[in-house]
Structure formats: structure tokens, C-alpha cells
Amino acid sequence: MEPADVIVVGAGISGLCTAKTYKELAPETNILILEERATVGGVWCEANLYEGIKTNNLVGLYEFSDFPLLGVSKYGVPEGSHIPGRVMYQYLTDYAKHFDVYSSIQFHTEVKEVEKLGDGWRITATKTNVNGSTTEKVYECKKLIMCNGLASTPRPISIPGKEGFDRPIFNHGGLAREAPAVAKDPSVNHVTVVGASKIGYDAVHLFASNGKQVEWVVRESGGGAVWMSTPWIPLGPWMVMLEHVVTTRFFTWFSPCIWGHHDGFNWIRRLLHGTTVGSLFWNARVGIHNYPTDIHDYIRSGQVTLRRTDIDHIGKGGSIEFTDGSHMQTDALVAITGWQLVPKINHKTSEGIDNDLGVPSSSQTLEQENFWKGLNARADQEILKQFPYLRNPPAAKPPFTQTVTPFRLYRGIAPPGLTAKGEHSLVFLQMVHCTANLIVAETQALWSFAYLNYKLPVDRSNVFWDTALTSRYGKHRYPWGFSAWWPEFVYDAVPYADMLLSDLGLRRWRKKSWRKELFEGYSVHDYEGINHEWVETQQKKVTAG
Ligand SMILES: Cc1cc2nc3c(=O)[nH]c(=O)nc-3n(C[C@H](O)[C@H](O)[C@H](O)COP(=O)(O)OP(=O)(O)OC[C@H]3O[C@@H](n4cnc5c(N)ncnc54)[C@H](O)[C@@H]3O)c2cc1C
Ligand SMILES: NC(=O)c1ccc[n+]([C@@H]2O[C@H](COP(=O)([O-])OP(=O)(O)OC[C@H]3O[C@@H](n4cnc5c(N)ncnc54)[C@H](OP(=O)(O)O)[C@@H]3O)[C@@H](O)[C@H]2O)c1
């Protein structure tokens, strides 16, 4: 058994950021990071780097506030461009080494179970050795920080007839490993890509740019194509960066947001959302055209053809039969199957109440089900009272279901059951979908440090109610996406950071002038130094009394 003060699960952006923050604020802490893969990076790990992958974000906006990527000659990413995946991988490796968290990582170590002890957590993991054999490892720690990501496990392909399909077939998890052979194989003329999420666009681009004829199947029963935008968009006479629009305070007011009041402009929000003045985009699933050429040119030229139907089954000779009665033959099939929400990790507590931890669960007791049903019904009423026009969402059904309860985390981070009992030993970071992931990573890392060390005031009587509001809000606000299961916010990241900073007693309005505060987009650089600011406020508290 290996003891540690703190264990972090996952060495992606959030795991590295939280470990670095912890080390900075409590250097004496013995931290271990358990990572199932061979390298750091998470979605940007070496093994995931498929041809053409780049950040949606422009360089400068997907980097840590105290470790620049933009302008550093080693990375060579020109201003105004997207960061290639390989640079992200290198950058995150450098970050881990620079802040001395790299040496705390145990690679090839997959966490299988976390169990609540009287004081802390026991973690059971499987270590894969160099010769491929596995060893069970057991760890114990006082504080556990889960940073295992929402996009770690692709769902398996479930198309009927898959076993008899005698052509290459893989999902997005195979884009790095299996796509190169298909893309370079001269005997492959025709590739079928199923799904038009951002990763679906990437797959289509990958094969089309390698000269393949691509049949792009967008499931009729699915969610359709993700909303794709150029990084710069026209706004009146100006060209503005989309990323900045969604993090500009003035524009965030137009999004009805249950935690919006934390930004300090509640009167404006009330005015907008209590009347019909407020307007809104319902879609939170946004991708950016980050390709060297216009991907639509392939459609215009006929190299990529679109088909809006479902696959009924597939079979021998690369045959695909569609539900509309049509059929075709292909040389390879790539299916975008989404990410698995059912946790791979078993969460155990003495009470066996894994959903009190707020993680997706399929073993809710009747008592728990009724508890949340009641709370959810009240939360729904409150949300629809505050934002009346959420009562009439666009007619669309959520395209997919997950067979588990949603994430229900206090502030999107802490298990409500334990928090309400006053126990702060576990957090889940970055269990959100948004475009301001670095703002979320840095503010959550500091919030969780304060929370885990009991330096954050929490109104225990309000924890379940607050959690229900946050978790139900997404379902009403973004009915087209995944919000029924986890917080998905594109327009609400700045007020989210405001909320965390308010909890920490830190400055929310971080711009240098009011004009900038209202009309300049926020980036992670506006949050530079928050750890230091928080330490100062703590010291002042001690001095005062
Ligand atoms: C292909 C792709 C591209 C993306 N591009 C962008 C982008 O351009 N801009 C943007 O803002 N967002 C992007 N995202 C969203 C992205 O998920 C977040 O920006 C961010 O990288 C998430 O970081 P994370 O650390 O929370 O999770 P991850 O990066 O997923 O890291 C989780 C880590 O936990 C490890 N892990 C999981 N389970 C276990 C276990 N049981 N035991 C041990 N280790 C485990 C994983 O191996 C992984 O290393 C992208 C997502 C994908 C899938
Ligand atoms: N930097 C980049 O260029 C880049 C690249 C990839 C991803 N990303 C980011 O990563 C995040 C995830 O994007 P993503 O493209 O990987 O996936 P996603 O947006 O999570 O979409 C997954 C797709 O999987 C399909 N799916 C099929 N069965 C499903 C099921 N049962 N449950 C859920 N989904 C199912 C859905 O397609 P149907 O609707 O057709 O069924 C869905 O659109 C996004 O924030 C995205 O912007 C960025």
C-alpha cells in the first residue's frame, strides 16, 4: 500500500493544473498523480494525436496563465493560428516538468475503484508493466482529486453486423492509431464517416485531405451536425473572436444563467430575463473551423457526399444497409460514438451511496431517487420562474440518452452528500463542457484547494438545493446537448468563474477599466495570480484575528 497526502487521478489539463496549484500552495504535500496512459496530456496525450488535430482555440487562449505558449519560439505557433496537437502535448509535458509535478506521476496506472475510508480514501489500481503483465496496486490518501475527464472513454461501436464487416472499422478512439493506415492505403478509395460532431468533422477532413472519397452519414436519429463557426465572426462593422464574444461580460448577460447573479450584475440580468428582452442561443455544442482549407470545398466538389439517415446494419464486402432502404459499399468505416459517461471507476462508500457523491450512477436506491425527484421538481419550478422563456424550448429532443443519473456536484466540483456532512475530502474537476476550459481549470484548481483544506465557507444547509439548481439548469438551458448529464456551458463560463472567485473572497471584476470589464473578452490571463491573491487574503484574515 502506498500512502500519499493527495492523489490526483488523471494527468490531463485539469490534473496537471490542480497538482501544480496544490504544490504551489502547500509545497510540503506528498502528491501522487495516477495516469492510465503512457504520457501526460489527457485528450492531448501522445497516443491521441491524430493527423490534423489542432485546438479549437486560437493560440494565447488555450494556455495556462503563468506558462506562456504564445510567443515562445520553441513552440513556433504564429499569432492568430490554432495550436497543433503535437505542440499541445509538448507544452503540457513542459508545464508538468517546469512546475515539478511530472516526477509525481505514475503512468500506466488505471484506477479501478475508490473507496471511502473513515479518514480519507483507498484507491485500487491496475499497473501495466513493461512486459504487458499487470499488478494490482493499492494507495491510501487523505484527499482525492478526480480529473479523469469526460472524453476519456469512447463508447464502443454497436452497429448490427459489425462482426461480419470485413473492412477496417473503428471509432474516434482509433483515429490516431488506425486512421493512418487507411488514409495511406492506395487500395482504399472510399471511407464512410458516421457522425458530425467536431471529431466527425476532423475525421472527414483527415480522409478527404488524403484524397479519399468520403461518404458522410449524419444519423437522422442523432443530434445532427454540431454548430461550426469560424474563429472570427462579424459583429456589426467589426470582426471579433468568437471565443471572446462568449467570455465578454456584456454578452454573458444575454444568457439566462442560474449562477449569473454571482457576477454582481443581477439587476441587469433580471431586467433582461424577467421580460422578453433577453435573447438567447440554445446551442452549446460549438466547433471551430480549424482546417487549413474550407472543409465545405470537399462537399462542393463532390469528394465528400452527405447522407442523412441511420445505418440499419453492415456486413460482408463492406456493405452498409440504411434504414431508408438504400445501401452502399465502402472500404472503411469510422463511427463517432460519443464518450462513455458510465464511470469506469467504481465509487464505494460505507453507505454504498455512490450517487450521493454526485457521480453518474445506475444503482440509485428508491429513497435516493425520490429525494432527487422532489428536489429536481422544486429546482425546475425555480429555474422556470426566473427564466420564463425556458418553458418553451425549440422543438428538439435530446439525441442520445445515457443510462445513468447525471453529475450532481456542488459548484460543479464537490460531492453534495459529503459536503453537506461537512466532509471535504473529494473533488471532481473539469466535469463540464465549455470553450473556456483553461479559465475553468485554474479557478477550479484554486477553489478545490481551499475546499479540501476547509478554507472555504460553505453553507451546508444549502448544498443539495444549490446542487439541484445547477444540475437541472443545464437541462432547461441547453436542451440539445449533453446538459441533462453534465454542466455544459459556453456562454456561462465567466459567471461560473465569478461564482468560484466570490466563494474564495477574490475580485471578480478583473479588467483594468469599466469599458474593458464590459466589452473585452475574458481569457485565462485575466486570472493570472489568483493563487497569490488568495494567499494574501488568508494572511490578512489571520492578521485580523
Ligand atoms: C479530441 C478533443 C479535442 C479537444 N479540443 C479542445 C479544444 O481545442 N479546446 C477546448 O477548450 N477543449 C477541447 N477539448 C475538450 C477537452 O476535453 C478539455 O479542453 C480538456 O482538455 C479536458 O481536460 P481534462 O484534464 O479534464 O481531461 P482529459 O484531458 O480527458 O484528461 C483525463 C486524464 O485522465 C486519465 N484517466 C481517465 N480515467 C482514468 C483512470 N481510471 N485511471 C487513471 N487515469 C485515468 C486519462 O487517461 C487522461 O489522461 C477537446 C476534447 C477532445 C476529445
Ligand atoms: N480541437 C478540436 O478540433 C476538437 C476536436 C474534437 C473534439 N473537440 C471538442 O471535444 C468535445 C467533444 O467533442 P466530440 O466531437 O468528441 O464529441 P461530442 O460533441 O461529445 O459528440 C459525440 C457524438 O457522438 C455521437 N453519439 C452516438 N451515440 C451516442 C451516445 N449514445 N451518446 C452520446 N453521443 C453519441 C453523437 O452523434 P449523433 O448526434 O450523430 O448521434 C455525438 O454528436 C467538444 O467540446 C469539442 O469541441 C475539439
Image (tube, rainbow, N blue to C red):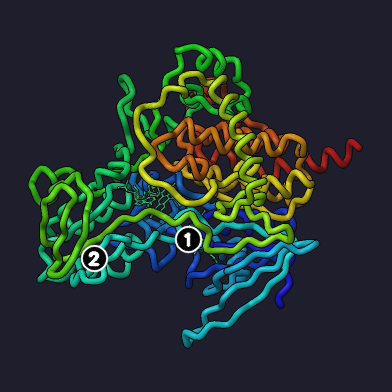
Structural crowding at the residue carrying mark 2, measured as other residues with C-alpha within 10 Å and reported as few (<14), some (14–19) or many (≥20): some
N-term mark: 2 or 1:
1
Under mark 1, the amino acid is Gly
Label 2 sits on a secondary structure element that is loop
- Note whether ligand 1 is within 8 Å of mark 1: yes
Does residue 450 appear to the left or right of 157 in the view shown?
right
Q: Is residue 361 visible?
A: yes
Image position of 238 with respect to 454: above or below: above
Where residue 16 appears, x then y in whole percent? 57, 59
Of circles 2 and 1, the one toward us is 2
Question: Which quadrant of the rendered structure holds the C terminus?
Answer: top right
Structural crowding at the residue carrying mark 1, measured as other residues with C-alpha within 10 Å and reported as few (<14), some (14–19) or many (≥20): many
Under mark 2, the amino acid is Gly
- Residue found at the far bottom of this picture: 131
Question: Which quadrant of the rendered structure holds the N terminus?
Answer: bottom right
Please identify the quarter of the rendering in which residue 463 is found: top right
Q: Which residue is mark 2?
A: 161
Label 1 sits on a secondary structure element that is helix
Residue 462, which numbered label? Answer: none
Residue at the image point whose x is 42% and y is 30% from the top: 245
Q: Is residue 29 visible?
A: no
Does residue 224 appear to the left or right of 23 in the view shown?
left
Residue at the image point whose x is 72% and y is 69% from the top: 140
| Viewer-side residue, 421 vs 315 | 315
Residue at the image point whose x is 21% and y is 55% from the top: 312
Where residue 447 appears, x then y in whole percent? 67, 45
Image position of 461 with respect to 447: above or below: above
Q: Which residue is mark 1?
A: 42
